[in-house]
Image (tube, coloured by chain):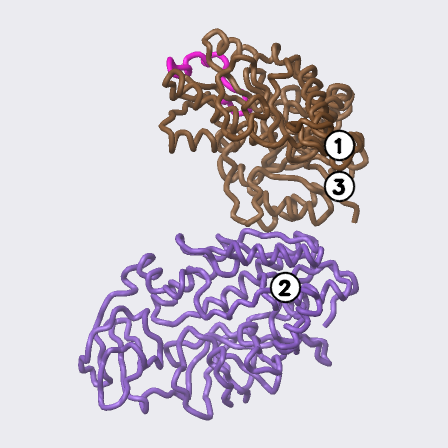
Chain colours: A brown, B purple
Amino acid sequence: MKRIYLDYAATTPVDERVIDAMLPYFKEHFGNPSSVHGFGQAGEKALDDSRRSIAANLGAAPPEIIFTSCGSESDNLAIRGTAFARQEKFGYKHMLISPIEHPAVQATVDQLVALHGFKVSYLPVDQFGLVDHENFEKYLREDTALVSIMSANNEIGTINNLSDIAGICRERGIPIHTDAVQYAAHHEINVDTLGADLISLGAHKFYGPKGVGVLYVRSGTDLLPIQTGGSQEFGFRAATENIPLIVGMAEAFQLVQEEGAPRRERLVPLRNQIIDFILEEIPKSQLTGAEPSKRLPNHASFVFEDLDGNLLIQVLDSEGFACSSGSACKTGDPKPSSVLTSLGYAPEWALGSLRVTLGKDTTRQEMDRFLEILPGAIQRVREVS
Amino acid sequence: MKPPAGSRIVVGMSGGVDSSVAAALLKDQGYDVMGVMLRLWSDSDTENRCCAPDAQLEARRIAAQLDIPFYVIDAQDAFYQAVVQPFIDGYAGGTTPNPCLHCNRQIRWKFLRSRAKALGADYISTGHYARIEVSENGSYQLLKNPDPDKDQSYFLHILTQDDLSRTVFPLADLSKPEVRQLARDYGLAVAERPDSQDLCFVGHGNYRGFLRKVDPSLLKSGPILDLDGVMLGEHQGLADYTIGQRKGLGVAGPEPYYVIEKDLVKNALVIGFKNKLGRMSFTVASINWISGESLADPLNADIRIRYKSKAVPGQITPHGNNLAHIELTESLPDITPGQAAVFYQEQVCLGGGIIQKEAL
């Protein structure tokens, strides 16, 4: 059975060109960038080149790029590092986030609230996951240490344009972070257009390796390290730099800049085909997240009433199609996803979710085959749900 | 009984040696094998033993080693409805219910088969020690495993012709040492967990605490009476006792006392000496005949009244479709309402029913 992967929002395969770029740094140029000798210098050059490349692609300065181990770590550093710095400097204890943040943000905030006396407010989202721009300022407080709102949601694909919100934060001197891990996999980002002070990226969402990410930190932003030790990454992240993965991330990010537009152009119609088909052919189905023009180009997500979403994923896998679900859970104890619950979906709907995310090499033939088997699979799952 | 070559078969995997070897054997025979574990309900502060995190990890690891898909499917609501609720009701009715029978019928077969079908599998398989054969007239038969210690046909007497036609027991006649050897041959590093007699869905043997939580009236103290109605002591709730029980009565006498009866109306526990204990006849209801044909005339068969007890010859006299009177050739001390009486002729398991409190 040929298996077809439709879960590119979870992770992507590493691009051949990225592998080629990485390979010399495992063995040939293996030096530690902190070392004085020539081996170290070669490593340092690769690190510097990668940093400059990513900085240039973001319209940022190289010292504003902090390499981390993943998007989640970038989120952790941004939230915890800023919260602690602003608490230390001003005694500020308040954070404003959206109710549909990635767990890396939500759980970090939860811990700050539980253990460190921080307070959190939530900027409301509508049923499509779009944040309330109009009333944004009302949610800010004198002691707001940080605002964090994701650029695009992994589960429902909704893109939130944050430039106006970021502008308000800049005026008020409040650092604003955005988790752009999903967004940056498809769209070019300019830090000044976007306006955020802290931006999280993860390489494996755009055909780079797992285990490497970036936190963009606008110069002058209050930040304390959360991993302490050596002075790597301008003192913000102690650890010997993982040069091969960093080189791979820089190469993969460069490819997004070069190929992002044609990838989007190809993916959007394929993605729209899924949305149109499902809403038309599958009874009791709804698109989750925003309308096609306001969502990630490769992202289609749905809920189906009275359907065991977990079982649907298993049935699709048994037919050779790898998809995902907001409620999917390997241990068989499904809970309605907190994102879907925040958007107001009742459990009868939220437990039956399906996420289909396409990749740069997904073909129309694959899509056709998927849509051919999908109604039958849903039918069979519904019969026993 | 063999499914057509290459058929897709869903194996119920527990992470233990039996189901792991069952999956390995089927994979070896060229079937399209999928491992499934059902997520079962458990009391709030415990994990269901059949799908606890370590069992899941084990099963997942074995599935990865065999290179078969592995899925955990949520069956918590169905399990509660089909197994836990009847368990509570059984105690409320003064019987000693056998939840494994309900689980096999409603969950391990009915529920799993329906999910298997959704996964494109017409067949399911488990690591039970029992054999399925097709007899000359084309009907399916359930046969005992030759090792009386491992034979699990007692719990399988609830299967129907339709179930058996879609079920594969790869362990069939194998012995436990043979299965262990197969595990070694296949390189399956399966930790052997001791068989547990505890209920899977409550913490360590604590069914009392569970019953008290769901229905405190099930554990109301009351009198312990002898057969003449003389009060000998106080019991802590009828659900704590089973017919034939000797230990834990807290009543001293010239010879040991045994539980003879539970009187729900008086909430009394009736005890007596061993000579009052035995019965030779009782009624069974909810009978399943594996052949699918109900009995017309009295039938002589060997009858097993508990999982590990020996079968005793007796006669089954039918009353309608699923009720029968059983007359044994010897008296047994532990005929317990709520447990199953299972019928055998030689190696063949004919079916069985649930022992009733009231005689016909």
In this figure, which residue is indicated by the disc labeled 1? Answer: A29
CA gap between label 3 and label 1 equals 36 Å
Q: Chain of mark 2?
A: B
**Residue A104: x %, y % from top left:** 53, 32
Q: Residue B318 appears at what percent x and percent y?
A: 50, 82
Left/right placement of residue A364 relative to residue B278 reads right
* Labels 2 and 3 within one chain: no
Q: Is residue B313 above or below residue A374?
A: below
Residue placed furthest toward the front: A37
Point out the frontmost of discs 2 and 3.
Answer: 2
Return the mark for residue B189. 2
Q: Which residue is mark 3?
A: A4
Displayed quadrant of residue A188: top right
At label 2, the amino acid type is: Ala
- Which chain contains the residue that carries disc 3? A
Classify A350 as above or below B33. above
Tag 1's secondary structure?
loop
